[in-house]
Image (spheres, helix red, strand yellow):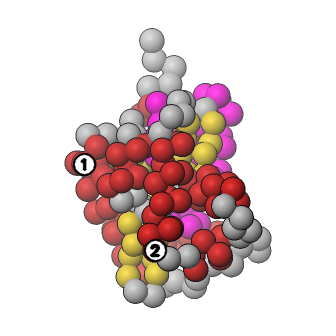
Amino acid sequence: MRVVVTGVPGVGKSTVLNMASRKMGYGIINFGDVMMELANELGIKNRDEIRKLPVEKQREIQKLAAERIGKMENVFIDTHLSIKTPSGYLPGLPEWVLRAINPSMIVIIEVDPDIIIKRRERDNSRYRDEDSPEMLLEHQSINRAFGASCSVFTGAPLVIIKNEEGMAEKASEILMEKIGYGKH
């Protein structure tokens, strides 16, 4: 089973995935990390260099990463449905990626935008864009639209899980339940 798990930065996706992974024995594969591994094989040293490559080369690396991930079993694929750019929202899972990964399920983790803002303020390890609650609601809405499109294309069910403050354990249990973990 390959479960794509997404959410805007700050929803607590990593926390929920780590909890579910420990209980289920699933691996967690970060799509961007796989892209970086492939880029390293091409002599590229950091993510910023990937962004500066010609778009066709970026797509080639993205497709190769998807093909590598598509061969894996019992993994959570940590990625993004949409990437907010100055030019608009880019799809994180274009059709060639979906085709190669062939996900069993697509999960969107969400939370109230005010909670996202508070979480981002506490996380000094990363540089995040400052977004208003309205902008975060828009991004989560775009993710739902992209997620529905991915579900239609692949036939994989789309699941939306709320990760309220202090409730990551509950969110991870809902994720495991949706996958069918523990059912005979």
Per the image, the residue denoted by label 2 is: 55
- Based on the picture, tell me whether residue 18 belongs to the magenta stretch: yes
Label 2 sits on a secondary structure element that is helix
Task: Report x, y in % for residue 161.
Answer: 44, 49
Residue designated by label 1: 153
Residue drawn at 53 percent across, 42 percent down? 69
Q: Residue at x 65, y 76 (%)?
A: 48
**Which one is in front, 129 or 31?**
31
Rendered view: 131 above or below 112:
below
Q: Position of residue 18 (x, y in %)?
A: 66, 43
Vertical placement of residue 40 versus 26, above or below: below
Q: Is residue 29 magenta?
A: no
Give the residue at the far bottom of this rendering: 86
* Residue 113 located left or right of residue 159: right
From the viewer's side, name the closer residue of 31 and 128: 31
| Amino acid type, label 2 | Val
Q: In front of the other: label 2 or label 1? A: 2
Horizontal side of 44 relative to 103 (left or right) equals right
Dot 2 crowding, Cα within 10 Å, few <14, some 14–19, many 20+: few
Residue at horizontal 65%, vertical 75%?
49
Res 120 seen here: no
Tag 1 secondary structure? helix
* Residue farthest along the top direction in this orientation: 184
For the magenta stretch, what is the residue range?
1-25
Outermost residue on the front side: it is 42
Q: Position of residue 74 (x, y in %)?
A: 54, 30
Res 50 visible: yes
Quarter assignment of residue 122: bottom right
Residue 173 vs 17, above or below: the answer is above
Q: Earlier in the sequence, mark 2 or mark 1?
A: 2
